[in-house]
């Protein structure tokens, strides 16, 4: 993490942010 663009949920990178979120969830479980 730590990428500034990840804070822009709903921006052009919304899909990427969602993928990152899924990856985080998978890592935590």
Image (cartoon, helix red, strand yellow):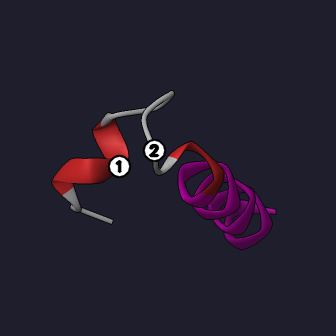
| Residue on which the image places disc 2 | 12
Q: Does the magenta stretch include residue 17?
A: yes
Q: What element carries label 2?
A: loop
Are the two marked residues, 1 and 2, in contact with CB atoms closer than 8 angstroms?
no
Q: How far apart are marks 1 and 2 (CA)?
A: 10 Å
- Which quadrant of the figure has residue 7? top left
Instruction: Residue at 56%, 43% (x, y): give it.
Output: 14
Position in image of residue 9 (x %, y %): 46, 32
Judging depth in this view, the residue of 21 and 15 nearest the camera is 15
Instruction: Residue at 54%, 51% (x, y): give it.
Output: 17
Answer above or below: position of 28 versus 7.
below
Left or right placement of residue 29 versus residue 16 in this view: right
Instruction: Residue at 68%, 61% (x, y): give it.
Output: 19
Q: Does the magenta stretch include residue 28?
A: yes
| Residue on which the image places disc 1 | 6
Instruction: Residue at 22%, 61% (x, y): give it.
Output: 2
- Which quadrant of the figure has residue 3? bottom left
Left or right placement of residue 8 versus residue 25 in this view: left
**Numbered circle sitting on residue 22:** none
Position in image of residue 28 (x %, y %): 69, 62
Left or right placement of residue 14 versus residue 2 in this view: right
First-in-chain label (1 vs 2): 1
Depth check, mark 1 against mark 2: the one in front is: 2
Please tell me how crowded label 2 is: few (under 14), some (14-19), or many (20+) other residues with Cα within 10 Å: few
- Magenta segment main secondary structure: helix
Q: What is the span of residues highlighted in magenta in the rendered image?
A: 16-29
* Quadrant position of the N terminus in the picture: bottom left
Please tell me how crowded label 1 is: few (under 14), some (14-19), or many (20+) other residues with Cα within 10 Å: some
């Amino acid at each position: 993490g730590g990428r500034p663009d990840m804070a822009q949920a709903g921006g052009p990178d919304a899909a990427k942010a969602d993928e990152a979120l899924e990856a985080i969830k998978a890592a935590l479980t």
